[in-house]
Image (cartoon, helix red, strand yellow):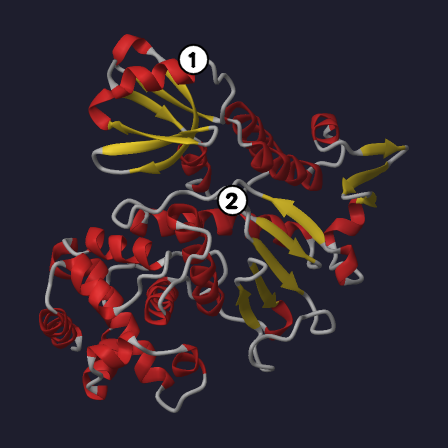
Amino acid sequence: MSALSCFLAACAILPGAGPDQVKLVQGDKVLEGRVVFEGKHEIVLRAGSRDQRIERKDIAGIRSLERSLAPILDRDLRTGDAATFEALAQECQKAGLENEARNFWLRVLLADPKNEAAVQAVGAQRVLEEVRVPFGKDRRKLADLTKRQASWKDAFELTSTHFLLKTDLDLPFALDITVALEGFYRRFYDTLGSPLELYVFDEAPEIDIYGGSKDFPVGPLKSDTIWFAPGVNQLHVLAAADPSVAAVVHELSKQMLFNALRRSAGTTAQVPQWTSNGIARMFSLAAPAERFGPWSDLGKPDPESFALAQRAKLGLEKVFNANLNDFNSSPQQAEMTAGAYTLVHYLVFGQGGELRPKYGQFLRAGAKGKISLQALSDALGMPRKDIESGWLAHIDANAH
């Protein structure tokens, strides 16, 4: 019996194994599970605790949460009305996007408090003309949802397909944030998912956004207004400090990489500091200048960063072996960040993207502890001197 036939037999006793479906060419069979990876030539379907690689040539169609969510994220919600949100809520329900469906029903209720379908969908109660909406163990007046909450203990908790958001800011803003988070998730995986072979994660990382400093936890540096805590998988953002979108994206990128590697390669998810900061810098440079604005091209080199790296004349070993302080508090912080960004840009976009899959191999091995310069050399199949010379040539080519 072939490996594919064995898998079909196993899946025959696993109905409802997950929200995704893969339709096979052979016999029009449909497998259920979770599509945790989509590559150019194959996918990985997780059914229960078992992962199975299926070649693209054997697949007739794929339905996954990520594919269903994509057209929703492409919509411009800024001018949406109750009817628009109701249609989107129903579309999400049909696609199995239960979290997004609830969030859109909340938008419907905010836009049209008399909408009975929305009241029923979110489990609200109507007493005379007053609507009370359940959040946790409490039921809150609809009018209070459009205000900043009195304290952090009253923070809203909203879930999307991949995230848990907690905030004491107003609900309309929080709902916009959930969509923005999912948009960033897609952008992250569209760029790095396939070439680095990053599996999707379904353990929702937590994003905490605080309206005031009273409840904001102290970060690695007392002055931190945005910081990621890997131990508890939480990103803390002090909204009162009015952080830029780029600054938030910088730390969110670190959290995304941590979760993606932990899912793909191991529970420890060790990430070299130069990789973490380089990838974070790459995404932050492309981030919108204003909230919910358009993104720039991720692959477009930032001439200022390349010029700074060129002037700094940092060697490969210095950037590769940099520690957290080198990027957070050293006198050469800016130069080290530029060095990390240009090195990551070279590995992701240099040489026509040919190094990306090999860089992915290094990162997955690094998540299990193999993060030496020799490990990078082995993964790329290049001597250290060739890695360095290729990187420096990439800097020179983009420093103008």
Tag count: 2
Q: Position of residue 309 (x, y in %)?
A: 23, 81
Give the image quarter of residue 43: top left
| Residue under pointer 1 | 12
Q: Nearer the viewer, mark 1 or mark 2?
A: 1
Q: Are marks 1 and 2 in contact (CB under 8 Å)?
A: no
Q: Residue furthest top?
A: 27
Q: Residue furthest right?
A: 128
Give the image quarter of residue 69: top left
Q: Amino acid at mark 1?
A: Ala
For the point 50% across and 60% down, which residue is it? 291
The disc at residue 162 is 2
Viewport quadrant of the C terminus: bottom left
Which element type, helix, strand or loop, lies under badge 1?
loop
For the point 10% across and 68% down, which residue is it? 383
Q: Amino acid at mark 2?
A: His
**Is 379 on the left-hand or right-hand side of 371?**
left
Residue 114, can we see it? yes
**Is 26 on the left-hand or right-hand side of 176?**
left
Q: Nearer the viewer, residue 203 or 149?
A: 203
For the point 29% across and 15% down, which residue is it? 5
Considering only vertical position in the picture, is 74 above or below 86?
Answer: below
Viewport quadrant of the N terminus: top left
Question: Mark 1 vs mark 2: which is more N-terminal?
Answer: 1
Which element type, helix, strand or loop, lies under badge 2?
loop
Residue 59, can we see it? no
Considering only vertical position in the picture, is 135 above or below 208?
Answer: above
Q: Position of residue 382 (x, y in %)?
A: 11, 63
**Is 254 on the left-hand or right-hand side of 372?**
right
C-alpha span from label 1 to label 2: 28 Å
Q: Position of residue 274 (x, y in %)?
A: 33, 71
